[in-house]
Amino acid sequence: MKQEFDLAASLAGGVEDRNGAWTFIQGFAAHWAGATLGRDDGWTEADLDTAELRLGLRLPTALREAYALFGRRRDLTSNHDVLLGPAELYVDDAKEALVFRHENQGAASWGVLLSSLQDDDPDWLNDHR
């Protein structure tokens, strides 16, 4: 018998730590998005290394893991707002944050403060324009 995906229970476990979040996303993708995560759904280590070299900084572990696990899955990352690809990541004009996401009409962007990049799972910053 196929076990159903329990959204509430999975989400509760998904907020405990990064591993829980990745497990939640895998279950959600399989059940709700209709396709399990595969090797081609994430960016390669080479893509992420190239982005880090271009930017001159190291991506936080959680951001790197997310890009590697499901960063190419537009159905999971960009239905409304857009997750930037590794080649599109940039440091904002104020030199305060690494920007990784844009609102679909350009009204907001999301990033990680440069002062928090050393944290494995840093808080993100939402900048409404």
Image: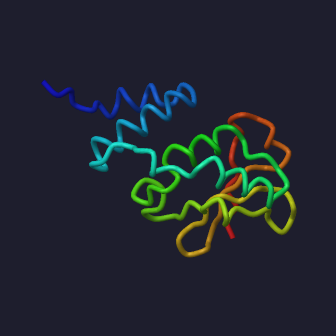
Locate residue 103, reporting x and y percent. Answer: 57, 67
Quadrant holding the C terminus: bottom right
Viewer-proximal residue, 113 or 33? 33
Residue under the point 73% across and 56% down: 50
Residue 83 figure quarter = bottom right
Color theme of the render: rainbow
- Image position of 73 with respect to 117: above or below: below
Describe residue 33's horizontal placement relative to residue 51 as left or right: left
- Image position of 26 with respect to 79: above or below: above
- Image position of 79 with respect to 33: above or below: below
Describe residue 105's horizontal placement relative to residue 93 as left or right: left
Quadrant holding the N terminus: top left
Residue under the point 80% across and 55% down: 53
Describe residue 79's horizontal placement relative to residue 33 as left or right: right
Locate residue 45, reporting x and y percent. Answer: 63, 47
Viewer-proximal residue, 46 or 85? 46
